[in-house]
Image: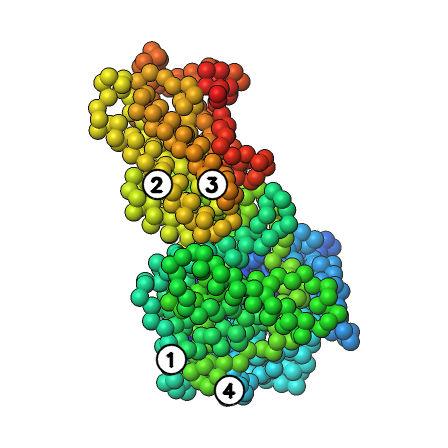
Amino acid sequence: MKNLWNDQDAEKAVELWGERWGRELALRAYTSRLIGSEPALVLHGGGNTSFKGTVRNLYGEEVPALYVKGSGADLHNIEPAGFTALDIARLGRLRTLPSLSDAQMTNELHINRLDANAPAPSVETLLHAFLPHRFVDHSHAEALLCLCNQLAGEHLLAEAVSPQVVVLPYVTCGFPLAVAVAHALEKRPDAIGVAVAQHGLFTFGDDARTAYERHIAIVTACEKFIEASRPQRRLTPSCQSEMPPAELAARIAPVLRGVLAEKTGEEDNPYRRMILDWRGDDEVLAFVNSAEAEPLAAAGPVTPDHVIRVRPFALFVPGFPTDSPEDMRKILGAAVAAYGQRYRAYVKEHLGAELAAGVTFDPLPRVILIPGAGAFCFGRTKYEARIAADITQQTLRVQRIAHQMGGYQAASPEHLCAMEYWSLQQAKLGKGARRPLERQVVLITGGAGAIGYGIAKTCAAAGAHVVVTDIEAERLARVVADIEAACGPGTATGITMDVTDEESVRAGFDEACRRYGGVDVVVPNAGIAHVAAVADLARKDLDRVMAVNFLGMFHTLREGVRVLRAQSLGGHVVINSSKNVFGPGKDFGAYSASKAAGHQLGKVSAIELAGEGIRVNMINPDAIFAEGSIESGLWATVGPDRAQSRGMKLDDLPEYYRSRNLLRVRVRAHHVGNAVVFLASNQTPTTGASIPVDGGVVEAFPR
Ligand SMILES: [Zn+2]
C-alpha cells in the first residue's frame, strides 16, 4: 500500500486549519483523509481516528480533551470540525468499571462532550480514550481481513506483521473491545499497533505521521505476505451463460425487486420496495460463476461490522431460465422464502431465545448472487444499496483470496448476530421521516425540459429515486447533478433515450432496471409542438409531432407496463397530457391531435390495467415557460408565433397566461410535479382521471 504522506500537502493542511485548530489537529485531519481515500482501508464512513489535545474552557484553562471522529463524518473529507472533543479524564475513568451497558456508554459519550452541539462521537470512542497515545488510527484494512478470515487466521496474521503488533482474537465492540485492547497494550509498551481478528487495525504514535506510516507499513506487510504465500488455487468455473450479463440482469432485476418487496399490511400502500445496485464486472462474474460461490455466499461477511449492510449471509440462486417473468418469480420467490426461514433459525439459535423474542425480523436478503448475471445488492435507498454493493465486492475479493490461501472462515455466527442486533449498529441505519414516494422509482421522459425537470425534482423531494430520460445528454447531466445536489447522492440518474425509437425506449427501461431494480411510476412527458393551421399542415410536420407526442408516449407506456408487470407490484402511469385536450386553440392541430390521441390511449390503458393494480391518470397543465434555469424547449419553438398571433411581445406571454386563468396564478412545473406525487402516492383510489393544473380555465374544464 502506498504511503501517501506528502510534506507539502501536510503544510497546506496546517496553513488551512492550523490557526483556528492548531497544528496537530490540522495534521490529524490531513492523515485521516489519507486513510479515508483508500478503499482498501475503509469503506463508506468506516474507520476512525483520534487525537489527544486540549480545549480552552470559559475560565481560560486548557482542559485535556480527546478529539475523535464524529458520527456523520467520513474520513475521506473530514475537517477538524468533524472531530468531537470529549472530556478524556472522565472517559478514562470508565475503564475502572467492571462493565458498562450500551445505554450507559451512549449516555457517557453524550454528556462528556465539551461542546453540546458537537456530533455524537464514534461508537469506538472508548478504545481511543483508554489508550495513552496521542494519535490513534483505525481502519478495517482489506489485506488484514484476508488473513484473519481463515482457519488459524490469527497465527497467519501474527506471522505476517511485525512482532511489535499485538494480535487479538475477535472481541465484541464497544466497552469490551476498548478494555481488551488497553489491557493488552499495558503488557506490551513497545507495541506500535493492535490487529483485531475479523475487525481491523489500530496504530498509534506521538504524531500524526508516525501513526499513519505505521498503519501503512503493517497493511503493506499483510499484502506482501498474501502475495508471497498465495498458492495458485483458482476458483472452479461452473457456469457458462449464453446471454450477456447486462441483459440477464435487466430481465432478472424487476422480478427480483418484486419478490423482495415487503408487504406492509396497509391498504393504500401495500408494498415497501427496495432499490438495487447491480454489479457485474469480471471479478464479480468470475466469483458467481464458480463452483465455490454457493458455499462462500453462505459463509458470512468479512467483519461483523458489515452485517447490518449485507446480512449474515448472501443468497445464492443457481442458474434458472429467464424467458418468462412468471417462472422466474416462482424460483426467486421460493429462494427468498427459504432464505427467510434460514435467517429466522439463525437468529433464534445464535441471539438467544430471550433476545430473539424481542426482535423484529427482517427476513430479506440484501445480496443475491446469480451465476451469469452478477451480484444484486439492495437497500432502502440507492445510497444504501451502493454501500451494500461496495462491501459485497470487497467481500467476494477477500473470500476468494482467503479461499485460495487455504479456506475462508468468517467470525462466529454468535458474533455476527450480536453485532447485527447491537443497538448502536441498528442506530446507524436510522429510521428517517416517511415521505410519500420513498423507495419508489419514477421514470420521466423529456426530463431535461422545464416540466420534466420540475416533475423529477418534485418526485425526488418526495423521496423517490428518479430516472430522468431525454435525448439531450448535456442538459440531462445538468438536471441530474442538480437533483442529486438537492436530494442526495444516488437519488437521480440520467439515461439518454429517444422516445420515437422503440429500441431506444426498451434499452432505456432495461438500463433503469439495472440501475435501480425497476420502475414504479412511469411519466410519459416528452413533447414537441408545431404551429400551423390544419389546411397548411405538412405531413412531415404532423408525423414529427405524432412520433414524439403520441408514439413516444405509447412506446414509454408499453415498455413501462412490461417492467411493472415483471415486478408484479401494481404501479402508476401518469401521462403529461395538456390543457389543450379540453381547450384546443387554432394553429395547434398537430399538437392537439397528438395529445388527444395519447389522452385517449391513457383512458383505454386505465381500463385494461386496473386488474393488475396499475393506475393510469392524466395531468393537464397550461403553459409552463421555465423551471429554475431550465427553459421550456417547447415554448422556445412556439412562443414567438403565439406571442405574435396575440399581438404581444414574447416576454409578456407568461403574464398573459397568468391573467387569463380564474385563480390568476402562474402555473409552474413543480405544480405538475405535485400532481404526479399526489396520484403516485395512492392518496385516492383514482384511475382514468384527468387533473387540470392550469389555474382554472373554464373552456378547458374536463368533460
Ligand atoms: Zn472498527
Question: For disc 1, does the CB lie below 8 Å from ligand 1?
Answer: no
Q: Let me know if residue 44 appears in the view.
A: no
Label 1, residues with CA under 10 Å away: few <14, some 14-19, many ≥20: few
Instruction: Mark 4 or mark 3: name the one nearer the start of the chain.
Output: 4
**For discs 4 and 3, the disc positioned in front in the rendered view:** 3
Q: Nearer the viewer, residue 463 or 371?
A: 371
Where is residue 518 shown, x and y percent of the image? Answer: 45, 51
Residue at the spot of label 4: 156
Residue at the spot of label 1: 236
Where is residue 16 shown, x and y percent of the image? Answer: 49, 55
Q: Residue at x 48, y 63 (%)?
A: 331
Task: Check the image and name the residue furthest to the top.
Answer: 647
Q: Which mark is residue 555?
A: 2
Three-letter residue code for mark 3: Leu
Q: Let me know if residue 256 appears in the view.
A: yes
Q: Residue at x 39, y 72 (%)?
A: 289
**For discs 4 and 2, the disc positioned in front in the rendered view:** 2
Three-letter residue code for mark 4: Leu
Residue at the spot of label 3: 609
Q: Nearer the viewer, residue 164 or 102?
A: 102
Label 3, residues with CA under 10 Å away: few <14, some 14-19, many ≥20: some
Q: Residue at x 60, y 42 (%)?
A: 268
Instruction: Mark 4 or mark 1: name the one nearer the start of the chain.
Output: 4
